[in-house]
Image (cartoon, helix red, strand yellow):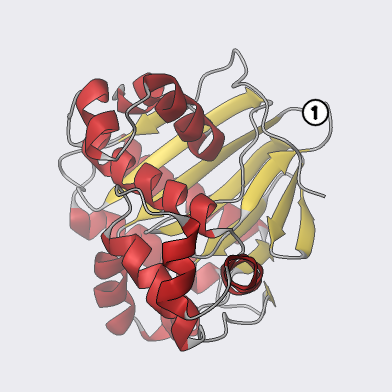
Amino acid sequence: MQASPRPVAASRPHFHRTPALPFVEARSAADSQACYRPHAHAEWSIGAVDAGSSRFSVGAEERRLVPGDLVVIPPERVHACNPQAHGRWSYRMLYIDADWMADFLATTPFAAALTDAAWRHARSPLAYRRFAEVFAAVRTGADAGRFAEALGQLFVALSEPLAVAPPIDALPPAIANVRDWLDAHCDASIPLTELAARAGLSPYQLIRRFVRHTGMTPHAYQLDRRIQRARRLLAAGTPICDTALATGFADQSHFHRSFRERVAATPGQYARRR
């Protein structure tokens, strides 16, 4: 069962961005109790557990992650990763632009197995060390060549058989139509009845089928897309108030709460560069 998000713990997360690598963002959190609602990223996500343990969930499947474990999550895969009940954990994440990754994978034969929509869980000491090298490349502002070389070595280490989940099934046209509309108009307000009419379904049928195929209700999906856009604006230096308005949040407290539930950090913490 998915834990309810709790307020971000006193140990603050840190976000690392460098002009030398504009297509990647790194995140580190130590001794954290923060929880996430189910969410997705527009980027590829690669994470490592450094201490403690957590529950990683994708749909109805759940895995226990321990120190040294890695997960690789393709773009738009709904997931959540939270500490064990009343526990704390430390972890690092990399978020890599989907277009950059597509170009990289297209020229990287040993990474071909990662081009499908399946997420992966690996328990490999070598892969964990390689991940640390990729993360360090972001922290130190290495150039793109060094980053790509380190990432390639990580994928070599991950080329051994991994625990995998099935790829995402194609969305039915009616659900894909609603999803695409929400992608393009995430900052707009639209009644559920209008979304349902767009799909040719009743509101109840739309909610049930949307959750079945995406892992979220239409409203949760729209909020998730707003927060994805907010992350991009904040990372580019847009003020928090302007970001909230640009993403459809008239209420600052609603923006703050929704952001924290999906990023496990406040907008101010996320915008702060280290």
x, y (%) of residue 106? 29, 83
Q: Could you tell me which residue is drawn at 21 percent across and 48 percent down?
A: 21
* Amino acid type assigned to the residue bearing label 1 in the image: Gly
In the rendered view, would you say 81 is above or below 90? below
Q: Is residue 41 visible?
A: yes
Residue in the image at 67% along x and 75% along y: 162
Q: Would you place residue 176 above or below residue 15 in this image?
A: below
Residue 52 is drawn in which quadrant?
top right
179 vs 236, nearest the viewer: 179
- Left or right, 274 with respect to 13, comes to left
Residue 200 on image: x %, y %? 48, 81
Answer with left or right where residue 7 lies relative to residue 190: right
- The answer to whether one can see residue 40 in this image is no
Per the image, the residue denoted by label 1 is: 87
Q: What residue is rendered at 49% in x and 70% in y?
A: 196
Q: Residue furthest top?
A: 10
Closer to us: 129 or 70? 70
Q: Position of residue 207 (x, y in %)?
A: 61, 65
The answer to which of 190 and 234 lies nearer the viewer is 190
* Residue sitting at x 58%, y 81%: 167
Q: Position of residue 154 (x, y in %)?
A: 47, 63
Q: Does dot 1 land on a helix, a strand or a loop?
A: loop
